[in-house]
Image: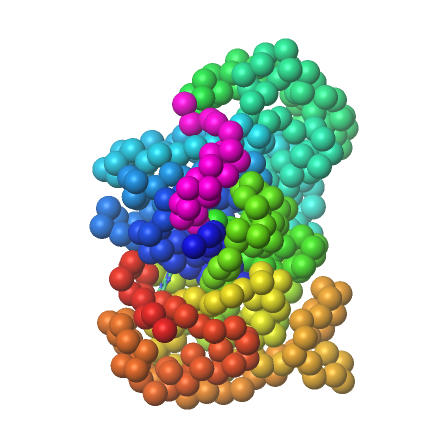
Amino acid sequence: MGVTAIVGANWGDEGKGKMTDMLVQHADFVVRFQGGNNAGHTIINSYGKFALHLLPSGVFYPSVINVLGPGVAVNIRALLDEYEQLVGSGVPAPDVRVSSRAQVVMPYHLLMDVYEEERLGARQFGSTKTGIAPFYGDKYLKLGVQVSDLFDEARLYDRLCRALESKNVLFRHLYRMPTVEPESLMQELSNLGERLRPFVCDTTVLLHNALSQAKQVLLEGQLGALRDPDHGIYPYPTSSSPLAGFASVGAGVPPHKIDTVIAVVKAYSSCVGAGPFVTELQGSEAHELRSRGGDSGEYGATTGRPRRVGWFDAVATRYGCMVQGATEVALTLLDVLGYLDEIPVCTHYRIDRDVTQQFPVPSLLDTAQPVLEVLPGWKQDISRVREFSDLPKAAQRYVETVEQLVGVPIRWISVGSSRDAIIRR
Ligand code: GDP
Ligand code: MG
């Protein structure tokens, strides 16, 4: 067995955290490979209910090594807070390693995120204001600060001077806000660096060595395929690639070692933040699905914002599974649909006079209308079912229809938020 990636096929919040927490039982390493603390994974287990933002989902298993790879946006304070909160809730101190090549989310990235959303006003992107877009902007402008830079005072000072030169022009003249001086950050960053130091190592070497000893590695994606900057709903993606293909880069593992890609697919749709969302519901239908969704309603794990909800979108999901390179699907939250007499699923999009199964380029998405097929509901609680054959016939048919539409085998069906609420197929 090589490496397994657990990734989202939709807009995020598909239940990846629950799936990872469940699959970790057989893993030695769980690796985050992109994003920062801008999204959340909800995990409900014997220790309680947790929303993890930066920590990998293996932190509840003492034998697992939890890695933040080079591709992750590390907000050190947020990471240390999350770690301390976890330990404070009675979870045994987890083994966490942070790549010395990962880059650091800076206080000025948070400021830029806030100022820019304010400036955009009604045109804002719905950023979580965790500094992720300015962070990745700096990374690719070559203005970032790597974790290892924190341990070299002269280099750190030089990196900050370069990063702040042009930002201060924006702060003063565009946003009309106070400037940030490199000197004012040095002490804070070197303190945070010292607190982080025990976790820091070359995680790429660590993982390569682990793989040569046939260790089990899980790569944990954040958000979902439709938030990918290249393949998603640009200009409303996240700022790093949530695709299994990028996991090789962001984690630092050989691409040919990733032999299983589990695309986590939601039995209905949800989407946080702005952007086209073809099957979106409004009014009382939306309200009911939102309040019955998730483990206690569809509200953001990071922001608490109400999530936009809609029917299952086979066009988007088939595409999401394709760009993820899914080898199998985990269909989650099926239990949520048990209140419906009939369940619409979107099989095609109508765009002008065309009816298509192909997910279009973003510029055409705004005009796309869902073509719905209505399936019978099962009108019962399925959260205690553990065998596919014990599901009501209508629920079996729903799963089989989704599988046919998406074109990837559904190997897992999640019927509740707890670890054991799973059907293996
Ligand atoms: P992630 O970002 O993909 O990890 O997903 P989130 O944790 O943000 O959102 C998924 C929500 O659904 C969480 O509240 C989970 O506890 C919950 N959840 C996951 N799987 C299931 C399931 O099969 N049924 C129900 N009812 N809730 C689930
Ligand atoms: Mg989430």
Residue at coordinates 48% horizontally, 67% vertically from top-left?
Answer: 328
On screen, 399 above or below 73?
A: below
| Residue 333, quarter of the rendered image | bottom left
On screen, 156 above or below 289?
A: above
Q: Nearer the viewer, residue 375 or 68?
A: 68
Residue at coordinates 31% horizontally, 51% vertically from top-left?
Answer: 25
Q: Ligand 1 sits in which quadrant?
A: bottom left
| Residue 23, quarter of the rendered image | bottom left
Colour scheme of the rendered structure: rainbow
In the image, which residues are magenta?
Answer: 198-218
Residue at coordinates 58% horizontally, 61% vertically from top-left?
Answer: 324
**Is 218 placed left or right of 132 in the picture?**
left
Count of numbered badges drawn on the protein = 0
Residue at coordinates 69% horizontally, 55% vertically from top-left?
Answer: 230
Q: Position of residue 303 (x, y in %)?
A: 47, 48
Quadrant for the C terminus in the image = bottom left
Q: Nearer the viewer, residue 47 or 68?
A: 68
Q: Position of residue 307 (x, y in %)?
A: 49, 60
On screen, 79 above or below 390?
A: above
Q: Is residue 114 visible?
A: no
On screen, 189 above or below 43?
A: above
Quadrant for the N terminus in the image = bottom left
Q: Position of residue 286 (x, y in %)?
A: 47, 71
**Is 136 placed left or right of 402 in the picture?**
right
Q: Is residue 166 magenta?
A: no
**Is 50 placed left or right of 343 in the picture?**
left
Q: Is residue 208 magenta?
A: yes
